[in-house]
Amino acid sequence: TEETIDLINSVSEQVALAISQSMLYQQLQQQSQQMRTELAVARQIQTNLLRQSWPEIEGIRIQARCIPAREVGGDFFEVLVHPQGDIWLAVGDVSGKGVPAALFMASAISVLRRELSQESPPPPNIVLRNLNASLSDDLVSNNCFITMVLVRYLPGQQKLIYANAGHIYPMVWSRSESATDEAEPTYLDTRSVPLGILPQWHSAAGEVMLPAGSALVITSDGITEATIAAAPSNGSQAMLRQTGLWSMLKQQTGLLNLDQVLEQVAAFNSVQEDDQTILSLEVL
């Protein structure tokens, strides 16, 4: 009958729609799994770009940690012991997150290593100037910028030379004096604009002595801008800031433990909002 034919056609259309939706769902699942796999590979590649080890230097202890907020991120660090004996340290932060930031992070590391691989690398401020010259066009065209601190430590002279492109101030202090309540770190405050803001980047280099018993810490803003409990009684929160980080650091006795710092920061944050990087150098 005509009613039967209409019913069959209606059921057929519903079955066809269900099959189509099922196939589309399977395709989306496959694409999602492929994307997760590709991002996992990208994260491993990015992790491999960061140095996992470096030569041991008598009287010097170096630690570095980098935790992306997503599968890949824009934070990075570098630790390089030059054949001349100088120690080069860097912490950088590409604006934004995810794959675009990760691509610029890889470019920055590549150019930085090229600069530092020279027989006699230029001073830190000239290295940053050269990085800006190499990367600024691409950064500007993609509305990105990079903040970065680059440090050169000369163990024989116990002298630290640094340059800062819009990054959080590094802090240095004497471990023997940090036990007192009144102890405060010295913030290395010579700084210029981030890389990628201006076609030409210029800044003076800063210098400070770092004798035995001293420590240096450099972080990204993912740590200092992490939230902590401001008043546990009412659940209010505030940013950690450098003052809060200093409180954590000076509570530690003996050698620094960066993993403990990251655990303390994570304890207050159910969701990590930004990449977190921290690097330290201790002169024993």
Image (cartoon, rainbow, N blue to C red):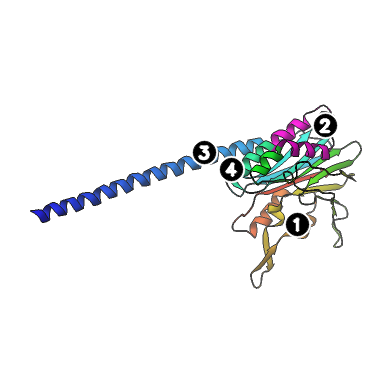
Q: Which residue in the protein does label 4 denote?
A: 99
Q: Which mark is residue 207?
A: none
User: Mark 3: which secondary structure?
Assistant: helix
Q: CA distance from mark 2 to mark 3?
A: 36 Å
Q: CA distance from mark 3 to mark 1?
A: 35 Å
User: Mark 4: which secondary structure?
Assistant: helix
Of callouts 3 and 4, the N-terminal one: 3
Q: Quadrant of residue 3?
A: bottom left
The residue at 82%/37% (across/down) is 126
User: Mark 1: which secondary structure?
Assistant: helix
Q: CA distance from mark 2 to mark 4?
A: 30 Å
Dot 3, crowdedness within 10 Å: few (<14), some or many (≥20)? few
Q: Which mark is residue 121?
A: 2
Q: Is residue 174 above or below residue 119?
A: below
* Residue 238 lies within the magenta run: no
Q: Which residue in the protein does label 3 denote?
A: 38
